[in-house]
Amino acid sequence: MSSVAGGTLDLDALRQGMEGRDLEAVMSLYADDAEISIVDQRHSPSHPQVLHGRDQIRMFMSDVFGRDITHHVDHIVAGNGTVSFLERCEYPDGSRVLASTVLDVDAGRIVRQEEVQAWDAGMPEPGYRDFAQPDEVRTFEKGRMELIHTPAGDVGRMVLSPGWRWSEHVRPIAGTELCQAAHTGYQLSGRMRIQLADGTTFDAGPGQVGSVPPGHDAWVIGDETVVLLDWAGATNYAQG
């Protein structure tokens, strides 16, 4: 471990967590009110992506670690309450992303993170993809997940027939008591009900954008097929 002003950040845990895509290990390093600012191919320096608090950070990290990407962390420098490092990421097709990150540390926890990413030229390629020709289709009883892979992450279209329920039709595949995917999506048709681990329920319908944390059940309401787009929780959905 390396000492920095305001406490000690476990740099070995940081490196091993990032390279091993260990969500819990990495999340343990963040303060409850931590903030992350990201400049990438979709977010300019004037309008960076900003994440506030552990819940938003967890959803983001869950999506990143759920992708089939290798991570390598090097050039770690610590001192005066800050830690900086380079992270080299590579997709299966050989496309690479380089991220330069600076952390502000207090009491051994990350309180602020600023990250600037550089992507290989042509990532993603201009143009549109069609779900009529998805890269991957995962089928399960009363439903399917269609996936289009992009360098910025997977986009999924979920089609769920009347009578579908996650705990009945996907849980045997996932092997978890509740769905552990964090979803951010847009509902195109049909209605569904989501129930969180604490019993909280809410409904989703056409035209709505929603965010659902890990640890939930969901089911179709009524006799209309649910179609929704998911750009956060699709990567590992309906996989053991």
Image (spheres, helix red, strand yellow):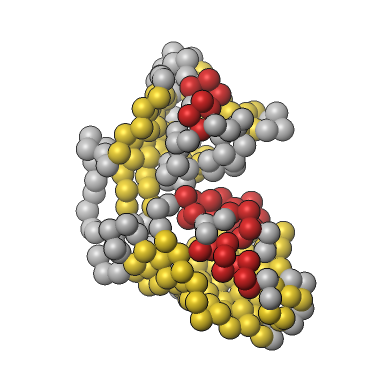
Image point (71%, 81%), residue name: 4
Decide if residue 15 is on the left or right side of residue 9: left
Total tally of numbered discs in the picture: 0
Q: Nearer the viewer, residue 68 or 198?
A: 68
Rendering coords of residue 31 (x, y %): 71, 63
Decide if residue 77 is on the left or right side of residue 64: right
Image point (41%, 66%), residue name: 89
Up-down relation of residue 141 to residue 78 (above or below): above
Evaluate whether residue 5 shows in this view: yes
Image point (58%, 28%), residue name: 217
Q: Nearer the viewer, residue 192 or 145?
A: 145
Image point (68%, 59%), residue name: 28
Rendering coords of residue 133 (x, y %): 22, 38
The quadrant the N terminus occupies is bottom right
Rendering coords of residue 151 (x, y %): 33, 57
Evaluate whether residue 48 shows in this view: no
